[in-house]
Image: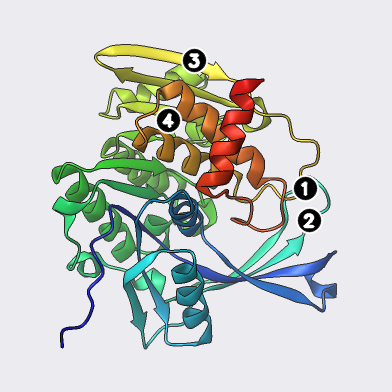
Amino acid sequence: MSAHVSPAPELLTFGEAMAMFVAENPGELADVEYFQRRIAGADTNVAIGLARLGFHVGWLSRVGDDGFGTFIRRTLEAEGLNCQHLAIDPDHPTGLLFKERALKGDDPRVTYFRRGSAASHLAPTDADAIDFPTLRHLHATGIPPALSSSARALSRHMLTQAREAGASVSFDPNLRPSLWSSEAEMRETLNDLAAHSDWVLPGLAEGRLLTGRDSTEAIADFYLERGAKAVIIKLGPEGSYYRGTLDDRLESFTLAGFPVAEVVDTVGAGDGFAVGVVSALLDGRSPREAVRRGNLIGALAVQVVGDMEGLPSRDRLTALEAELSAQ
């Protein structure tokens, strides 16, 4: 009797998922006694968000042969992710992080234990089993290439192969300067990956740092000149800016963000924005509708504790979008 083989995912993400321990009470980590266990990772946040919207999403990574790796796999599979490309590394541990419980609206401080983790040993060979021609879309961030030279090589391989196979590619720089040996290396590497992407999604400060340009228009043009089809810049509570070509016509606009009565935790807002933009573009929506959905899901993400707990189901998103259209 042949083993059941899952169909190849239509969307693929890759990177590092970590076990996260969130403080139960505000205060310095040195004083915290109780934590809640969750998972963390910008790439998995986007993967989970897209899976909740009904896309068949695959996850490529490595975890350690330990309880935290098992916890991550079970959590991702429970969210509907295809984990056939999630390898167990018997020689290196799963990464961990500890996060303070932030006071309202503040960015929580985080302590990482990820150096030498299983995911930092990712390499191009981890992609050997991927059927790129069946892939519809690849989402990438700037975190895997920051982990190690082998993970950097994997990132370049993934984007190159996906694009050559005809899949669309989205790229969120997701800067982690402390993981890089130099700012110059970070800029050069991430700008190269952005040049292999269709949709580039930097924050304004990230775009300024990476391109050396100041205005949203100039940052967008930097990537459009290098091969991107659209650049969507996150402006925080102010919303976001879009500039891209559609049917050989250049379109630019800024859309205001959705007001949020109480900001609980800002971590994951950019990932929620990516979920909104990418899902809408894959749904065939217009750029304006895509940016609006990005702003909406980003606003939902900051209203809860945790990185991906605020990401909506397709039913909830449909209801929210219908409600907004009726206003």
Report helix, strand or loop for mark 4. helix
Q: CA distance from mark 4 to mark 2?
A: 31 Å
Q: Mark 4 or 2 closer to N-term?
A: 2
Q: Is residue 114 above or below residue 313?
A: below
Location of residue 234 in the rendering, given as x and y in whole percent from the top left corner:
55, 32
**Which of 71 and 222 lies nearest the eye of the viewer?**
71
Q: Is residue 223 left or right of residue 17?
A: left
Report helix, strand or loop for mark 2. loop
Residue 211 numbered mark, or none:
4
Determine which quarter of the picture holds residue 144: bottom left
The quadrant of the picture occupied by the C terminus is: top right
Residue type at mark 1 is Asp
The answer to whether the residues at label 3 and label 2 have Cβ atoms under 8 Å apart is no
The answer to whether the residues at label 2 and label 1 have Cβ atoms under 8 Å apart is yes
Residue 102 numbered mark, or none:
2
Residue carrying label 1: 106
**Which of 175 and 286 lies nearest the eye of the viewer?**
286
> Which label lies toward us, 1 or 4?
1
Q: Is residue 172 left or right of residue 258?
A: left
The answer to whether the residues at label 4 and label 3 have Cβ atoms under 8 Å apart is no
Q: Residue at x 74, y 74 (%)?
A: 35
